[in-house]
Image (tube, rainbow, N blue to C red):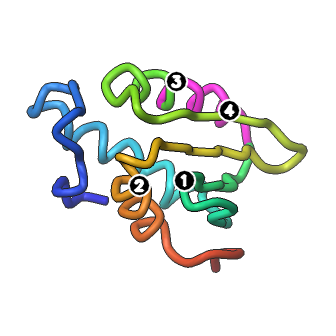
Amino acid sequence: MTELSWVPQSCTLPTEERPLRVAEWDALFSERLISRSRPEPLRLRLDLVAGAGVEDEVRDLVEREGCCCSFFTFEVTPGEDRVHLDIAVDQAHEAVLDAIAALTGTDGELP
């Protein structure tokens, strides 16, 4: 996700902080993402490998992301061995969700 062109104009995170935030998402996805699906056009579900502190890390990240990009709705649901992260947007921001979906790979279980 290192390309920042998908970041919408409505994001209020200072420009100089955006690469750092993108790097946080990149790290989370590369280290923890095990599957993803698009159950609805405006919702993306990501399954992350659970572990010590992972749920707290995800909650912290989505809370900060929600502060600068208020069009996102995040739902974090802990499971036995996974943390489920649902990301939803309104119709006006579907392209942002499309970009995140494309950057996280294809539907289903990941290698």
> In the orientation shown, which residue stands out farthest toward the right?
80
**Residue 29 percent location from the top left of the image:** 50, 56
Question: Alpha-carbon distance for marks 1 and 4?
Answer: 23 Å
Image quarter of residue 39 = bottom right
Q: Which mark is residue 60?
A: 3
User: Type of residue at label 2?
Assistant: Glu
Residue 70, numbered circle? none
Q: Is residue 82 left or right of residue 86?
A: right
Label 1 sits on residue: 42
Q: Which residues are magenta?
A: 51-61
Kind of residue at disc 3: Asp
Q: Nearer the viewer, mark 4 or mark 2?
A: 2
State the separation of the CA atoms marked 4 and 3: 9 Å
Q: Is residue 58 magenta?
A: yes
**Picture coordinates of residue 48 (x, y %)?**
67, 52
Residue at 68% x, 32% y is 55
Q: Position of residue 111 (x, y in %)?
A: 64, 80
- Name the amino acid type tagged 1: Leu
Query: Is 88 placed left or right of 46 in the picture?
Result: left
Label 4 residue SS: helix
Give the label, 3 or 1, closer to the camera.
1
Q: Residues within 10 Å of mark 1 (few under 14, many from 20)?
A: some
Tag 4 near tag 3, CB within 8 Å: no
For mark 2, give the secondary structure.
Answer: helix
Image coords of residue 46 (percent x, y)? 63, 55
* Residue for badge 2: 94
Dot in front, 3 or 2: 2
Q: Which mark is residue 55?
A: 4
Mark 1 or mark 4: name the one nearer the start of the chain: 1
